[in-house]
Amino acid sequence: MDEFLPFLRDNQVSLIQQLKDGKYRSNPARRVEIPKETKDEFRRLGVSTVVDRVFQQAIIQVLSLVYEE
């Protein structure tokens, strides 16, 4: 997260423009395996990038105002 704020400052205009133009494409999720309680079994997770999570949260906040009524 410490590295994200300078990145956001440097790229916010470009990122916002990509969103407005419909050209933003999310990055591939990072695959992580979490061990289950049972032996030799793992749960596979896809972890979104920080930029994608920020965009997802912003969209959720706007849509929740519309649909929570």
Image (spheres, rainbow, N blue to C red):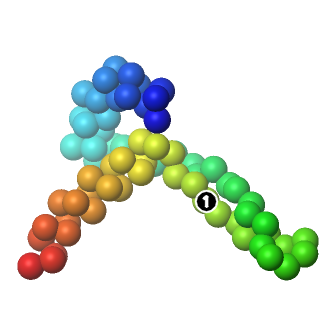
At 46% from the left edge and 29% from the top edge, which residue is drawn? 2
In the depicted structure, whether residue 53 falls above or below residue 38:
above
Quarter of the figure with the C terminus: bottom left
Task: Determine the image quadrant of residue 45.
Answer: bottom right
The outermost residue toward the left is 69
Residue 57 shows up from this direction: yes
Residue position for label 1: 46
In the depicted structure, whether residue 14 falls above or below residue 65:
above
In the depicted structure, whether residue 51 falls above or below residue 45:
above
At 46% from the left edge and 35% from the top edge, which residue is drawn? 1
Q: Is residue 17 left or right of residue 51?
A: left
Q: How many marks?
A: 1
In the depicted structure, whether residue 12 falls above or below residue 62:
above
At 26% from the left edge and 53% from the top edge, which residue is drawn? 58
Q: How busy is the neighbourhood of tag 1: few (under 14 within 10 Å), some, or many (20 plus)?
A: few
Viewer-proximal residue among 44 and 5: 5
Q: Amino acid at mark 1?
A: Gly
Viewer-proximal residue among 25 and 9: 9
The outermost residue toward the front is 37
Viewer-proximal residue among 2 and 25: 2
Task: Determine the image quadrant of residue 12.
Answer: top left
Q: Residue 57 location, x and y as percent?
A: 32, 55
Q: Is label 1 in a helix, a strand or a loop?
A: strand
Q: Is residue 36 left or right of residue 62?
A: right
Residue 25 shows up from this direction: no
Q: Residue 20 location, x and y as percent?
A: 21, 43
Q: Is residue 46 left or right of residue 58?
A: right
At 51% from the left edge and 45% from the top edge, which residue is drawn? 49
Q: Residue 53 location, x and y as percent?
A: 41, 51
Q: Residue 25 location, x and y as percent?
A: 42, 46
